[in-house]
Image (cartoon, rainbow, N blue to C red):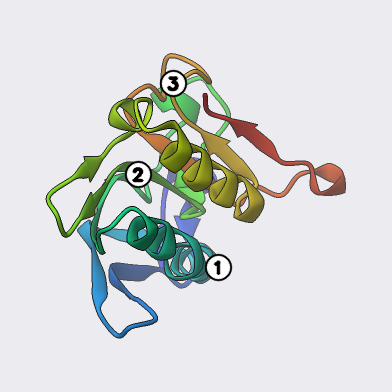
């Protein structure tokens, strides 16, 4: 277990290093991420069922996912006085880029130029996660996209990424 200050922590943390894709290949997570089992499962399904096929449609195989942040005992947007972030519970991950076998690095800024690809990735993330924040949501998410499983009343989801 990870026990952090002020209520942070994960009762049964997982260290995720890669996702096994449908064809048996792996999409490595670099650096490895620490998270709750539920978040790891949601990410694995998203990568396997959505992201890898979207990459294949674009003519390449998903090989790596660049992790910008996973478990981190901190307030939202790294503000000390803010409510605890979902990162503080191992319930979130920030993706800096998706790296394909042909060398393309699909970061949120580059995806702005590939609207069809970006829209597919965004729509799939918004369908699976409670919160998706990316470029255009606020000044804190211009160079990555944030995914989490925050529990909200009536199953409300927040999807803000242009």
Residue positioned most to the right: 154
Query: In 3D space, how far apart are the residues under numbered discs 1 and 2 (Cα atoms)?
Result: 17 Å
Image coords of residue 147 (percent x, y): 50, 45
Q: Residue at x 33, y 83 (%)?
A: 23
Q: Nearer the viewer, mark 1 or mark 2?
A: 2
**Which of 29 and 1 lies nearest the eye of the viewer?**
29
Q: Which residue is mark 2?
A: 95
Mark 2 neighbour density, 10 Å: few (under 14) some (14–19) many (20 or more): many
Do callouts 3 and 1 mark residues in contact (Cβ within 8 Å)?
no
Do callouts 2 and 3 mark residues in contact (Cβ within 8 Å)?
no
Q: Residue at x 49, y 61 (%)?
A: 50
Q: Which residue is mark 1?
A: 38
**Quadrant in the rendering for residue 1:** bottom left
Earlier sequence position, callout 1 versus callout 2 = 1
Dot 3: element: loop
Query: In 3D space, how far apart are the residues under numbered discs 3 and 1 (Cα atoms)?
Result: 26 Å
Q: Residue at x 52, y 24 (%)?
A: 162
Mark 1 neighbour density, 10 Å: few (under 14) some (14–19) many (20 or more): few
**Which of 80 and 71 lies nearest the eye of the viewer?**
71
**Quadrant in the rendering for residue 140:** top left
Q: Which residue is mark 3?
A: 79
**Which of 49 and 93 lies nearest the eye of the viewer?**
49
Dot 2: element: strand
Which numbered circle lies on residue 143?
A: none
Earlier sequence position, callout 2 versus callout 3 = 3
Residue positioned most to the bottom: 24
Q: Relative to 161, does residue 156 appear above or below in the rendering?
A: below
Query: In 3D space, how far apart are the residues under numbered discs 2 and 3 (Cα atoms)?
Result: 20 Å
**Which of 130 and 75 lies nearest the eye of the viewer?**
130
Specify whether 137 is left or right of 143: right
Q: Residue at x 45, y 67 (%)?
A: 40
């Amino acid at each position: 277990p990870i026990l952090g200050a002020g209520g942070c922590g994960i009762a049964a943390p997982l260290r995720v290093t890669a996702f096994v894709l449908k064809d048996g290949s792996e999409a490595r997570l670099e650096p490895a991420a620490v998270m709750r089992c539920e978040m790891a499962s949601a990410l694995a399904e998203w990568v396997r069922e959505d992201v890898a096929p979207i990459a294949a449609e674009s003519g390449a195989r998903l090989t790596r996912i660049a992790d910008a942040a996973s478990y981190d005992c901190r307030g939202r947007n790294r503000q000390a006085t803010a409510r605890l972030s979902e990162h503080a519970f191992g319930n979130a991950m920030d993706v800096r880029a998706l790296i394909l076998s042909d060398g393309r690095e699909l970061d949120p800024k580059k995806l702005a130029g590939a609207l069809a690809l970006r829209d597919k990735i965004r729509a799939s993330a918004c369908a699976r996660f409670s919160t998706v924040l990316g470029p255009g949501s606020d000044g804190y998410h211009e160079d990555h996209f944030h995914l989490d499983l925050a529990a909200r009343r009536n199953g409300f989801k927040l999807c803000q990424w242009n």
